[in-house]
Image (cartoon, grey):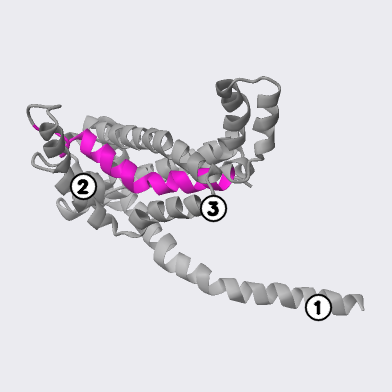
Amino acid sequence: MTQIRAGSTAFRLSSAGWLVLPAVLLLAAFFVYPVFWLLMRSFSQPEWGVQNYQALVERTVYARVLWNTISISGLTTIGCLLIGYPLAYTMATASERTRRILIFVVLIPFWTSLLVRTFAWMVILQKQGLINDLLMDLGLISAPLALIYNRAGVLIGMIQILLPFMIFPLFAVMVRIDQSYSSAAATLGAPPMRNFFRIYLPLSMPGIISGSTLVFVSALGYYITPALLGGPADLMIAQLIERQIATFGNWGVAGALSLVLLATTVLILGLVQRFAGVRTAWGR
């Protein structure tokens, strides 16, 4: 009887392995191999060695682009958190009908093409665009503001595009928070601000961590929005990789930059796991 059970378990494990095998092969063929091939070129072109990584250290332009990438990603994360937190709170505490409407409003731009949304921002932010025309008609400004082809344009576009990645993790955590804790604190005399900072904010922290991680890691590799809305001083690492390949044919430096981007992403995820814990970070 024991042998039959052992054999049945082995068969189930084998079946599970066969079911996973196509996904593993696809992942290996279309992700692992191309990434490995690109990273190997960082050591083999133009010749075997670490000259490409030495160039990243010695040339200040690469450090400036890396700083641009980290600072823009960080500011985008902060902007998404400041806008997304109250919106997610409203969604979590609203009636069922209002909640469905708000979720639909958030999902509409999320379902729209990234390229279409970026071109829409180009129209809205230009000197004769909707925002400048409205501000001038209201008499708030006398000359058009510079809202595009600079850091402001990049941040506005990236915050709007990545906002759903912050809202939905926050909403998933907030909707499960037991409101009786806040009610009990209010009954015992806690003012609203203390109630929020001592009760609600710590309980919503898993959503803040998971949403911030998603937004920051996604922003690190952004290309289209900074390329169309940013200026020369706002070059990010994904744009630099594209230029190294398309303009200069320099696969070695492009591979080294890709490794830096990959290592930065892995480092951030490792820090989140180390200090926040995977279970906490992903709201489980």
Up-down: is 7 above or below 214? below
Give the structural element (helix, strand or loop) at label 1.
helix
The boundaries of the magenta stretch are: 144-173
Residue for point 11% across, 32% down: 136
Q: Nearer the viewer, mark 3 or mark 1?
A: 3
Return the disc, 3 or 1, that comes first in the chain's sequence. Answer: 1
> Could you say where residue 186 lies in the image, as x and y percent from the top left?
65, 25
Distance between the alpha carbons at the discs numbered 2 and 1: 61 Å
Upstream in sequence: badge 3 or badge 2: 3
Q: CA distance from mark 3 to mark 2?
A: 32 Å
Pick whichever, 45 or 111, lies toward us. 111
Judging by the rendered image, the residue that carries numbered circle 3 is 96
In front of the other: 124 or 223 = 124
**Residue at disc 2, secondary structure:** helix
Residue that carries the numbered disc 2 in the rendered image: 121
Circles 2, 1 touching at the beta carbon (< 8 Å)? no
Label 3 to label 1, Cα distance in Å?
Answer: 50 Å
Q: Would you say residue 117 is visible in this rendering?
A: yes
Mark 3 closeness class: few <14, some 14–19, many ≥20 residues within 10 Å: few
Q: Residues within 10 Å of mark 1 (few under 14, many from 20)?
A: few
What amino acid type is highlighted by mark number 3?
A: Glu
Name the residue carrying label 1: 7
Tell me if residue 149 is in the magenta stretch. Answer: yes
268 on left or right of 129 = right
Residue 269 spot, x, y in % from top left: 51, 42
Give the quarter of the image for residue 191.
Answer: top right
